[in-house]
Image (cartoon, rainbow, N blue to C red):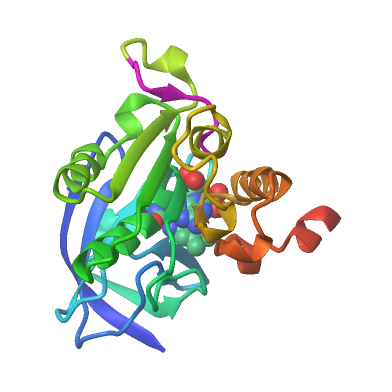
Amino acid sequence: MTIRCEIESIDYLNQDTRRVILRTPHHIEFHAGQYLEIVLPDRRCPFSIASKPKDDNLIELHIRPTGDSEDSDLIENLLDTERVVDIQLPLGECFVDTLPTGPLLLIAASTGVTQMKSIVEHLHEVGFTHEIFLYWGVLKEEDIYLRSTCEAWSKTNSNFFFAPVISEPTLSPSWTGRTGLVGKVALDDLFVTPGSKYRKVSMDKFSVYISGGPGMVYATTDLFVEIGLPINNIYSDMFALAPRSVLKTQ
Ligand SMILES: Cc1cc2nc3c(=O)[nH]c(=O)nc-3n(C[C@H](O)[C@H](O)[C@H](O)COP(=O)(O)OP(=O)(O)OC[C@H]3O[C@@H](n4cnc5c(N)ncnc54)[C@H](O)[C@@H]3O)c2cc1C
């Protein structure tokens, strides 16, 4: 079903990523972690829902332009010129509807953090008591556009742990935090580095959610499966949207 929404507001979260608030004509049910599609005349573009499920008619999106992309150019033009937008939702099977029975590891690349924001805010609201680890990988420091939000979650929720990770430290000379590929950094921190908190805890208690492009999602999945995490504990929209069998034949 296509729903026409008003664009309630648009503001910049950093140099290029825009927060877009849509007002839907009526309340729409979705689960934390689901996405919607913006409907254009000849195509649809997916965007994760950043807001948690709630009783109002507002939906938050974070939209970042990508270079050399006709889809992205069309979306940017729509945001610059239109007051209404058509959407389809709810979409995606990688969501949280029942409370996980163990800790959660959320691994996001770039705007993949949008999906995690909805999940974290939902779990905080319902009083989830297991640990939530959010590892967010970006190219450079300025890309951590939700840093103060994530740090505020750490301060107000003792079970929430936030680790931003930068993959190109040469672009951020003053960065003193974690560097490398986000999935590998998370794996080393939690399960490999001697003295890590969870080293002796059964890994199969963890649920791992991964958000990003297919290359990042499958590389991260392989790392965790290699060290013994059951594949059924790993969740990503890419498993349905870009199945590995299809990628291999391309
Ligand atoms: C399920 C899904 C959710 C998406 N959510 C967002 C979003 O919240 N904000 C946004 O700016 N773009 C998001 N995208 C990407 C967005 O749809 C495209 O950037 C846009 O349609 C332009 O198409 P493209 O082929 O040029 O980009 P693509 O090459 O498809 O994507 C480029 C950028 O989108 C990011 N991206 C890819 N997959 C996801 C994902 N699952 N979740 C979040 N980011 C992703 C990548 O890290 C990269 O920065 C999402 C894509 C998918 C499949």
**Residue 63 on image: x %, y %:** 34, 52
- Horizontal and vertical percent position of residue 11: 17, 49
Please name whichever residue, 193 or 19, is drawn nearer the observer in this view of the structure: 193
Q: Magenta segment range? A: 175-183
Can I make out residue 74 in this image?
A: no
| Residue at far front of view | 200
Q: Where residue 112 appears, x then y in whole percent? A: 43, 51
Which of the 4 quarters of the picture holds residue 119?
Answer: bottom left
Image position of 166 with respect to 89: above or below: above
Residue 189 seen: yes
- For the point 42% across and 57% down, the residue is 103
Q: Disc count in the image?
A: 0
* Residue at x-position 58% and y-position 33%: 192
Left or right: where 233 falls relative to 197: right
Residue 39 point in image, percent of width and height: 42, 73
State the residue in front, 204 or 2: 204
Asked if residue 179 lies in the magenta stretch, the reply is yes
Q: Is residue 32 magenta?
A: no
Question: Which part of the image, by quadrant, shows the N terminus?
Answer: bottom left
Q: Quadrant of the C terminus?
A: bottom right
Quick check: 142 left or right of 135?
left
Q: Is residue 180 left or right of residue 247?
A: left
Residue at 29% across / 62% down in the picture?
Answer: 129
Foreground of the two, 131 or 238: 131
Residue 149 picture quarter: top left
Report the residue at 30% width, 28% height from top.
Answer: 142
